[in-house]
Amino acid sequence: MTRHRTAIALTLLVTLGAVAVGVPAVAVPAGPAVTTSALTSAPTTAHVTESATTVVDALDRASHRLRTVEPGGDTRDLRRLDRMIGDARVVGLGEATHSSHEFFALRHRVFRHLVEEQGFRTFALEAPWSTGLRLNAYVLRGEGDPRRIMREEFQRDYLWWNNAEYLALVEWMRSYNRRHPDDPVQFMGDDFAWAGPELYDEVTGYVARAHPGLLARFTSLYRGLRPTMAAGAYIEQYLHMPYAERKERADRTGQALKLLKQQAPGADRAAYDWAVRHATAVDQTARGYAFDFEDSEQLRAARRFRDSVMADNVAWWAEHTGDKVLLAAHNAHIAYVPDDPVHYPKMQGAFLRDRFGDAYVSIGLTFARGSFNATGPEDEVRQFTLGPAGPGTNERTLDRVRHRDYVVDLRSAPQPARSWLREARPTRSIGTAYPEPEHDVALARSHDVLIHLHRVEAARLHDR
């Protein structure tokens, strides 16, 4: 594998994208917006166990209309969702594309409702741990300019989060905390591709205060690792490092983490716990890059490692803060079963279910038509538009339900919908790159709850 292919492989590790080997690229005309038909595989006869009409009738009875996806206003239509969530401590709320307005706006609306009605206090995003710390400092104390933070942090593989919709969410969170300083909401990032300089400063600062005799050792172990460049350039640099150098870096961050864990917590247990977690985040980044991406089995292991790390970070946060968490990530990450098991052996949702049991709830999202931003065949960010879902797809049947936008509990759907929902069929699952083939997804095996939207529009990206 060439260095270029190694970089592509790691990009696919960091964010979901097309990974199917041997699938021909779809010709896409040039231009800022592209309309393309659904990439749909034909259904097999095994999929057709009940007529679509009887399935739709059953879904009609089980579904509950959503008034809007936009935040603010009356949220009585979300009370059914409250019942579906129940006593969950962590709720995964997915997306079928990485850059559609309605998915981001709905998360804002649901989070506000859960904060105000159900006691949720943390919004977790598929973004680096250090990025979450910077945004949380703004949300909690007003430190920094959120527009600038997003510009500096959401680069390269995370550029999709630098949008008007998430800025509005962050600003609402800050406004909420001004009104509720004694019971604040928080923002966290659960991913690892970028470990900002703040993390190294937090760890060495703690060591200097609590264990000054170890500072020289930590300084030596972290030498040359603390970023001195922008996030996107840092990720790009890591992508092009030789495998041996990436392994050596991970060895040093691992030594630092082990050394810190060997120290007594002392009187300030909270400070110790946070320092260990920051050192863990530093090590996660180095270790996440320390796989041989020219080896297909190691690449699978790297993707499994990423989802395990994201789950572990969310679980640590929930357990150490006591907050109930709304987790925002792609449908594939919050799901229980992978929609591409050849490349992604185990997903974040499965790890969270292992950790929390029924106290983790997964909410998947689907859409029937509309637009989104993604990276095209020529590595350019552009807008794509999809028409109605094709025959034999999950979305084709879901969009026949009487409500335009709705929520349905997949665990209690009546027959024959229940059986239909447990069968895998082509479903849109679009990551950072497009075109890509649809994956066969069994909705009720992947999620507990489903929100279906009739139409979506591309998110409003900043700095593009």
Image: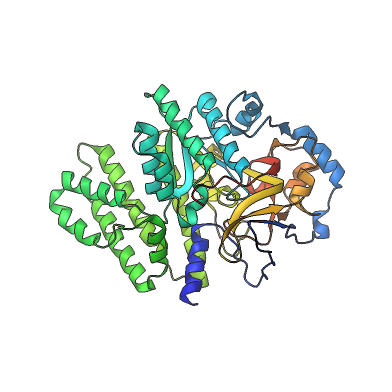
Query: Horizontal placement of 213 versus 352: left or right?
Result: left
Foreground of the two, 428 or 79 = 428
Is residue 75 in view?
A: yes
Where does the image place residue 186, in percent across and percent down from the top left? Answer: 42, 35
Where does the image place residue 263, in percent across and percent down from the top left? Answer: 21, 49
Q: Quadrant of residue 176?
A: top left
Is residue 121 in view?
A: no
Identify the residue shown where x is 80% and y is 35%.
402
Foreground of the two, 193 or 146 = 146
Residue farthest front in this picture:
31
Q: Is residue 240 above or below residue 100?
A: below
Where does the image place residue 414, in percent across and percent down from the top left? Answer: 77, 37
Q: Is residue 135 above or below residue 430?
A: above
Q: Is residue 281 above or below residue 58?
A: below
Foreground of the two, 331 or 461 = 461
Colour scheme of the rendered structure: rainbow
Query: Horizontal placement of 140 versus 386: left or right?
Result: left
Query: Horizontal placement of 200 versus 183: left or right?
Result: left
Q: Quadrant of residue 150?
A: top left
Identify the residue shown where x is 78% and y is 48%.
396
Number of marks in picture: 0
Identify the residue shown where x is 59% and y is 33%.
85
Q: Is residue 309 above or below residue 364?
A: below
